[in-house]
Amino acid sequence: MSDQDLAAAKRDAEAAKARLLGTAHELQERLSARNLAETAWDAVRDGGQAAAQGAARAVRARPVAAAAAAAGLVALVAARPITALVGYFRNNDDTDGDER
């Protein structure tokens, strides 16, 4: 192998090493915690926006069904507090009648 061939091989090796280090730095940046968190947040935000847009379209398409579903959800969530409130008023009405 001549000196020129050896010098060319060294230059090629240095160029390959520089490309490899550049790729490693790029991967390190892509896999940084901050970058991963930003990417995840963007995905969640985009998914949330798409879900909200889909829900808005569904409500516009079937407003009565959406209102019924909302009322059912409220009734489901508020059933226990409403029952307790009715029981409270019933107990107070019973005791008020006994005192008279």
Image (cartoon, rainbow, N blue to C red):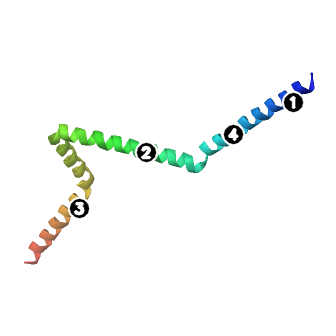
The residue singled out by tag 2 in the image is: 44
How far apart, in angstroms, are the residues tagged by discs 2 and 1?
Answer: 52 Å
Pick the quarter of the image with the C terminus: bottom left
| Camera-nearest label, 3 or 2 | 2
Percent position (x, y) of residue 65? 17, 40
How far apart are the alpha carbons under marks 4 and 1? 22 Å
The first of marks 1 and 3 along the sequence is: 1
**Mark pair 4, 2: CA separation:** 30 Å
Q: Which residue is mark 1?
A: 7
Task: Indicate the quadrant where residue 11 lies.
Answer: top right
Percent x, y of residue 73: 24, 48
Q: Quadrant of residue 29?
A: top right
Q: CA distance from mark 3 to mark 4?
A: 67 Å
Along the polypeptide, which appears first: circle 2 or circle 1? 1
- Disc 4 target residue: 22
Q: What residue does disc 3 label?
A: 84
In this rendering, would 100 be left or right of 73?
left
Which tag, 3 or 2, sits closer to the chain's start? 2
Q: Is residue 62 left or right of residue 31?
A: left
C-alpha separation, residue under disc 1 versus residue under disc 3 = 89 Å
Could you tell me the amino acid type at mark 3? Answer: Ala
Q: What is the residue that sits farthest to the bottom in this orientation?
A: 100
